[in-house]
Image: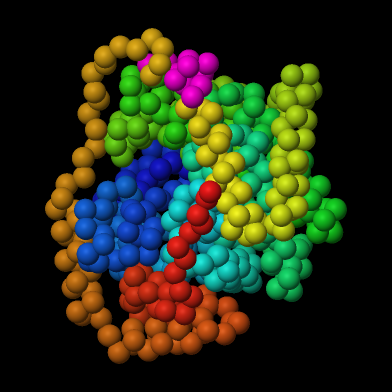
Amino acid sequence: MRQFAGHKTAKETNQRFKYLLAHGETGLSTAFDLPTLMGIDADDPRALGEVGREGVSITSLADFETLFSGIDLAKISTSMTINLPAPVMLAMYLIVAEKQGVPWKRVRGTLQTDILKEYIAQNEYLFPPEPSLRLVLDTIEFCVKEVPRFYPISISGYHIREAGATAVQELAFTLSNGREYVQRLVARGLPVDEFANHLSFFFDVHNYFFEEIAKLRAGRRIWARMMKEEFKAQKMTSLFLPIHCQTAGVSLTAQQPLNNLIRTTYQALAAVLGGTQSLHTNSFDEALALPSDEAVRLALRTQQIIAFESGVSDTADPLGGSFHLESLTNRVEEKALELMARIQEVGGVLPALERGFFHREISESAYRYETDLLSQRRKIIGVNVYTEKTKRPKILKIRSQIEHKQIRSVQQLKKNRNNAEVDKSLRILKETAKVATNTLPCVIEAVRSYATLGEIVSTLKEVFGEYRGVTVL
């Protein structure tokens, strides 16, 4: 199980990490602030007002050294919610492990890395799709060879669902993205059985209880058949669909926020009954702000009560054989396969993306959802039925001094480091990006010199260019 733990500065997040580990957490999950997600340094004018607001602020290796100070990377698994600059975060993590004396072959964790869903739903991208995909493939290839216990990608439906997709669309789009990565890795010359068990997946678990369970079950069936029949995988582990689930953030309401405890609980239960291997439970106050300590503790206890008191995790596929669930699983699988076939008919994920296929599908579903709310065909307690005024809970507030402190820290780093070494490492990275060579070793050396996240991303941007997005008519 993992629990949200990223907020404020690296030092304060480190304290939250230690708190969670002391209270029974078995792994760490860190979310980053918006500048970090976009590859922007904390002292960049574009970052003003956003530093440390929605996650931990990371600008250089120095921040990662603070983030994991006193935390043994040989004993924990860390999940990092990062995409555009994922290779840089991986480099920082590996160097911290190295400095702790932990061999890379012992390092465990998950990197999100899934850039395709950024173009489809979340929009946190910078480079055009092709060079972005190259960085994803570089990261996976590097980890397969050098960091074998690490999941270098979490192919994500979560953000697609949060943008307004249905359960079927979430499943179909996510597995189509997975197919795209597999096809490209095979084209690179990597045997499918060499990398397949390094892929992981990330799904949303929404309100419709049985449909969410059916979605996860259908996903495993589709993926196993695809890997065996389409890609000729031989190993049984190559057919597996390792799943991390998160309860639906979009289902949380600012009205009557304590109701979110109930929503999160049965969503978490659906994830377990559906066969998830890893779980993130949202905090009840996240529709209002970053979670408070009390809300985080309740979210963690929700997982622990399900795990240790309910008995639902004692049996594999405990609802298997139910007429309703088996029928629903078949229906979800059939509809998802139909949608995946439509994507293939237009040439695959990238042509579908350029034609605005995904954006149109999601926007139409999101529109139907909103009209159902307005008409009360879909009921949400406290929002469009059984409404009443409730007292606003105490929420976490991020002090402005956090941002000022981080900016000063970055400016001091840039002044005191060996800038000649930084410039040299960035020149080498730029030249490597121009040719068909894996970029990860050069990213690692740039990070080791204390080149900042923004400097590394800007160097790559000089070679790859910037993507302006798709116009949907």
- Where in the figure is residue 464, as x and y percent of width and height? 48, 75
Q: Is residue 422 left or right of residue 346?
A: left
Q: Is residue 373 rendered magenta in the image?
A: yes
Q: Is residue 422 rendered magenta in the image?
A: no
Magenta highlight range: 371-382
Q: Name the residue rendered at 81%, 59% in the picture.
A: 231
Seen as rendered, the residue at the extreme front is: 473
Q: Name the residue rendered at 58%, 69% in the picture.
A: 130
- Where in the figure is residue 282, as x and y percent of width and height? 43, 34
- Where in the figure is residue 63, as x and y percent of width and height? 31, 64
Q: Is residue 362 left or right of residue 187?
A: left
- Where in the figure is residue 318, as x and y percent of width and height? 70, 25
The answer to whether 174 is drawn above or below residue 373 in the figure is below
Q: Name the residue rendered at 45%, 53% in the picture.
A: 123
The answer to whether 234 is drawn above or below residue 55 in the figure is below
Q: Is residue 152 left or right of residue 339?
A: left
Answer whether residue 202 is visible to the viewer in this image.
Answer: no
| Circle count | 0
Here the colouring is rainbow
Answer whether residue 407 is visible to the viewer in this image.
Answer: yes
Q: Is residue 15 left or right of residue 359?
A: left
Give residue 213's quadrant in the image.
top right
Q: Nearer the viewer, residue 19 or 142?
A: 142
Q: Nearer the viewer, residue 126 or 418?
A: 126
Q: Nearer the viewer, residue 206 or 8?
A: 206
Q: Name the residue rendered at 79%, 50% in the picture.
A: 226
